[in-house]
Amino acid sequence: MCVEPVDYSVLVNNEVVGPIILGKGLRQGDPLSPYIFIIGTEGFSSLIRDAEYHIIISGVRVCRSAPSVSHLLFADDWKNYFLFLKPDESQAQVMKYILTI
């Protein structure tokens, strides 16, 4: 009952066009959205941390004594991730594989 199809109507030249029926998906503001974000980003972060642990990829440091940063995820916008890697083709291939998973 939490995920239901939704239909929209839009105005084109002051005339109602529609209904436009969406088949699947969650909408912004849906009560499930924060949970879906947490589940997805936790899996994504785990894959990146595992690759770092096995020294397949490495993040960047602002100085020698600073911790390494490989990724930043923003809770208010799940489409914006910042990935920090060394400029190396093998690390880019690993990140491409992680993103595919």
Image (spheres, rainbow, N blue to C red):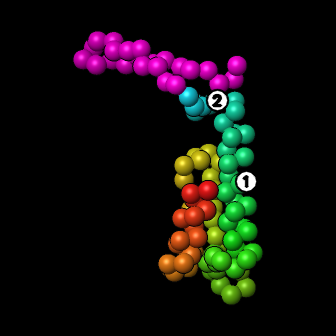
**In the rendered image of this protein, does residue 78 appear above or below residue 56?**
above
61 vs 54, nearest the viewer:
54
Q: Residue beneath label 2, please?
A: 30
Quadrant in which residue 98 is drawn: bottom right
For the N terminus, give its image quadrant.
top right
Taking the image as shown, residue 22 lies to the left or right of residue 64, namely: left
The nearer-to-camera label among 1 and 2 is 1
Give the extent of the magenta segment: 1-23
Quadrant in which residue 62 is drawn: bottom right
**In the rendered image of this protein, does residue 88 appear above or below residue 96?**
below
Q: Residue at x 38, y 15 (%)?
A: 18
N-term-proximal mark, 1 vs 2: 2
Residue 41: where, in percent of width, then height? 68, 52
Taking the image as shown, residue 68 lies to the left or right of residue 19, namely: right
Question: Mostly what secondary structure, the magenta segment?
Answer: strand
Taking the image as shown, residue 40 lies to the left or right of residue 95, namely: right
For the C terminus, give its image quadrant.
bottom right
**Amino acid under disc 2:** Asp
Q: Residue at x 67, y 44 (%)?
A: 37
Q: Residue at x 73, y 85 (%)?
A: 65
Q: Residue beneath label 1, please?
A: 42
Q: Residue at x 65, y 84 (%)?
A: 63
Task: Characterize the local packing of mark 2: few (<14), some (14-19) or many (20 or more) Cα atoms within 10 angstroms.
Answer: few
42 vs 29, nearest the viewer:
42
Instruction: Give the CA distance from mark 1 to mark 2.
Output: 19 Å
**In the rendered image of this protein, does residue 4 appear above or below residue 76?**
above
Task: Confirm or deny contact between disc 1 and disc 2 (CB under 8 A).
Answer: no
